[in-house]
Image (cartoon, rainbow, N blue to C red):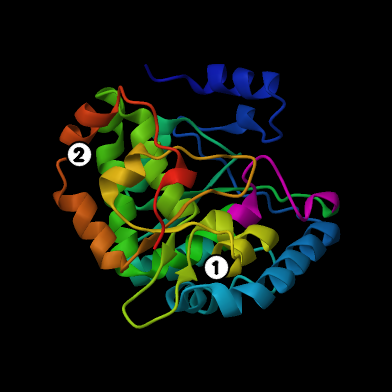
């Protein structure tokens, strides 16, 4: 059942979420806040400067190319301007949202190559950790890799297919795929060192280093069905990071797999323990 904007706004207020959900349109988009303070701009520059020191060393080259092409570092980005640049590269645009939105509208946006970005930014006291996704996580974390055509195609396919898999009882399974790719994905092309691209890593000062350089990080070769069956944590470092051989391989695996069959086989099974999956 689709939830109304009014009901969702009430739920978010009861949960203490800070976005202004009362301003949502029917598709859960809002206007970008154009009244960012100098303190907001300072937080943005601090986050970008600090993270880029790691990202230049640990991120996949296509992510770095995306940051350079979209111009995200000097000030809080203008959503429409960045959307125009992104659209020219892979056909994607940016829409502003107040934070987390329901699964249905989120999938609909992805299916139409619209990426939802939160319109508010964390405070100075939240530089290291924030519970809700904010503009830095969404923009700095997710948007640059959407300049990569194969990954951009995968994200559109994900939006097209996810609701059907939810309806088949595979909501947890399809969510795990997003988590271990768009949020915490690594890539290790043949002959190249493993690098990061997932937004949860790109926007985290501490976990990015752990995922790539940590002696205890469990880096696992990507397998679509294994990913969809593997549990994850939201409040600690991941106990497994799946390594793609390429973005094209991810797109092909998702496009050609019997996803309904994977869901049927796994939806009633307990999730796999990520720490128990054999690493590379």
N-term-proximal mark, 2 vs 1 = 1
Q: Residue at x 30, y 32 (%)?
A: 163
On the picture, is 166 further left or further right than 2? left
Given residues 62 and 31, the one toward you in this image is 62
State which mark lies toward you, 2 or 1.
Answer: 1
Given residues 149 and 130, the one toward you in this image is 130
Q: Quadrant of the C terminus?
A: bottom left
Residue 141 image-quadrant placement: bottom right
Dominant secondary structure, magenta: loop
Residue annotated with mark 1: 212
Q: Which mark is residue 68?
A: none
Q: Which residues are magenta?
A: 125-137
Outermost bottom residue = 191
262 vs 207: above or below: above
Residue 100: in magenta span: no
Q: Could you tell me residue 256's position as x and y percent?
A: 14, 51
Residue 79 at least partly seen: no
Residue annotated with mark 2: 259
């Amino acid at each position: 059942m689709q939830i109304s904007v009014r009901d969702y706004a009430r739920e978010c207020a009861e949960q203490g979420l800070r976005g202004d959900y009362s301003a949502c349109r029917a598709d859960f988009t809002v206007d970008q806040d154009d009244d960012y303070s100098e303190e907001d701009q300072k937080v943005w520059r601090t986050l970008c400067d600090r993270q880029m020191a790691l990202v230049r060393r640990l991120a996949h080259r296509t992510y770095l190319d995306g940051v350079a092409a979209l111009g995200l570092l000097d000030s809080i980005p203008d959503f429409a301007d960045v959307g125009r640049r992104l659209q020219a590269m892979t056909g994607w645009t940016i829409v502003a949202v107040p934070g987390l939105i329901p699964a249905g509208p989120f999938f609909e946006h992805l299916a139409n190559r619209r990426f939802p970005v939160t319109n508010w930014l964390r405070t100075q006291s939240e530089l290291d950790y924030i519970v809700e996704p904010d503009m830095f996580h969404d923009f700095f974390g997710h948007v640059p890799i959407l300049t990569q055509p194969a990954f951009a195609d995968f994200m559109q396919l994900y939006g097209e297919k996810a609701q059907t898999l939810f309806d088949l009882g595979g909501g947890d399974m399809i969510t795990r795929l997003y988590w271990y790719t768009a949020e915490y994905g690594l890539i290790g092309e043949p002959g190249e060192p493993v690098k990061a691209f997932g937004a949860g890593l790109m926007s985290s000062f501490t976990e990015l280093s752990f995922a790539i350089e940590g002696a205890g990080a469990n880096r696992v070769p990507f397998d679509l069905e294994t990913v969809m069956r593997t549990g994850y944590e939201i409040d600690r470092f991941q106990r497994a990071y799946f390594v793609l051989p390429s973005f094209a391989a991810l797109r092909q695996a998702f496009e050609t797999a019997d996803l309904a069959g994977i869901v049927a086989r796994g939806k009633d099974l307990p999730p796999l323990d990520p720490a128990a999956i054999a690493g590379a």
